[in-house]
Amino acid sequence: MMRSALLLSTILMLVAPPVLSQPEQRTDMGEAAIDGFAYSIDLNADGQISPIEMDSATRQVFTSMDVDEDGLVVRNEMIGWENGLSGLAEFRGRGQAYGATMGLVFDMLDADRSGALDVDEHAAGLARAWVYADRDGNGMMSVSEFRDNFLVTVALRTALTE
Ligand SMILES: [Ca+2]
Ligand SMILES: [Ca+2]
Ligand SMILES: [Ca+2]
């Protein structure tokens, strides 16, 4: 728990100072991709990502990251995920930052430090991130909470732009 909290604060420190959302960010490819993730997770399009929607998304993501289909996701599978933003990061000369930041996300999700995630470990870690992102505590992660406070989103933005 302490280790997770430390990694999370490390990642959050990387984005300090908090960037106020600016209208032109929406035309940024990274921001557009983040919005695309939000809309694909929000299956019933109510602007809120429920725990069930989150869990369903994490399981789909896990399957698509597990390229060798051994039921485990290792660090390089997460960093190289084809639906992630590694291509955009490379294009911007941010490949190294992307790898390092996604490596931190991997470490945070790898609760038992085995060097690999199983599907439930991955889902449980992202469920914790969901709880953290629900800043107003209303039991739902809104799309804006997802954009601004969800660990993976924050990490992706950091990797691409900071
Ligand atoms: Ca929803
Ligand atoms: Ca695998
Ligand atoms: Ca909320």
Image (spheres, rainbow, N blue to C red):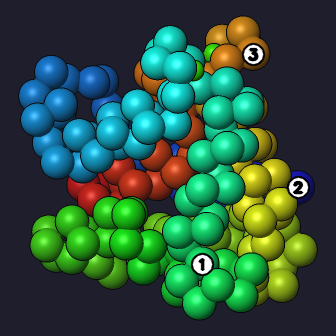
Ligand 2 near label 1 (Cβ, under 8 Å)? yes
Left or right of 45? Residue 52 is right
Ligand 3 near label 3 (Cβ, under 8 Å)? yes
Mark 3 residue type: Gly
Q: Nearer the viewer, residue 151 or 61?
A: 61
**The C terminus, quarter of image:** bottom left
Mark 1 residue type: Asp
How far across and down, in percent of the image, does residue 91 sit?
A: 13, 73
Quarter, ligand 3: top right
Front: mark 1 or 3? 1
Of callouts 1 and 3, the N-terminal one? 1
Q: Badge 2 is on which residue?
A: 1
Is mark 2 in CB contact (under 8 Å) with mark 1? no
Crowd band around label 2 with a 10 angstrom C-alpha radius: few (<14), some (14–19), many (20+):
few
Which of the numbered marks, if any, corresponds to residue 146? none
Is mark 3 in CB contact (under 8 Å) with mark 2? no
How far across and down, in percent of the image, does residue 77 sit?
A: 53, 82
Q: CA distance from mark 2 to mark 1?
A: 26 Å
Which of the numbered marks, if any, corresponds to residue 139? 3
Crowd band around label 3 with a 10 angstrom C-alpha radius: few (<14), some (14–19), many (20+):
some
Mark 2 residue type: Met
Front: mark 3 or 2? 3
How far across and down, in percent of the image, does residue 17 sit?
A: 38, 37
Q: CA distance from mark 1 to mark 3?
A: 30 Å
Q: Badge 1 is on which residue?
A: 66
Mark 1 element type: loop
Mark 2 element type: loop
Please report the residue visible at 67 percent of the width from the left and 18 percent of the height from the top: 140
Q: Quadrant of residue 61?
A: bottom right
Q: CA distance from mark 3 to mark 2?
A: 22 Å
Left or right of 110? Residue 150 is left
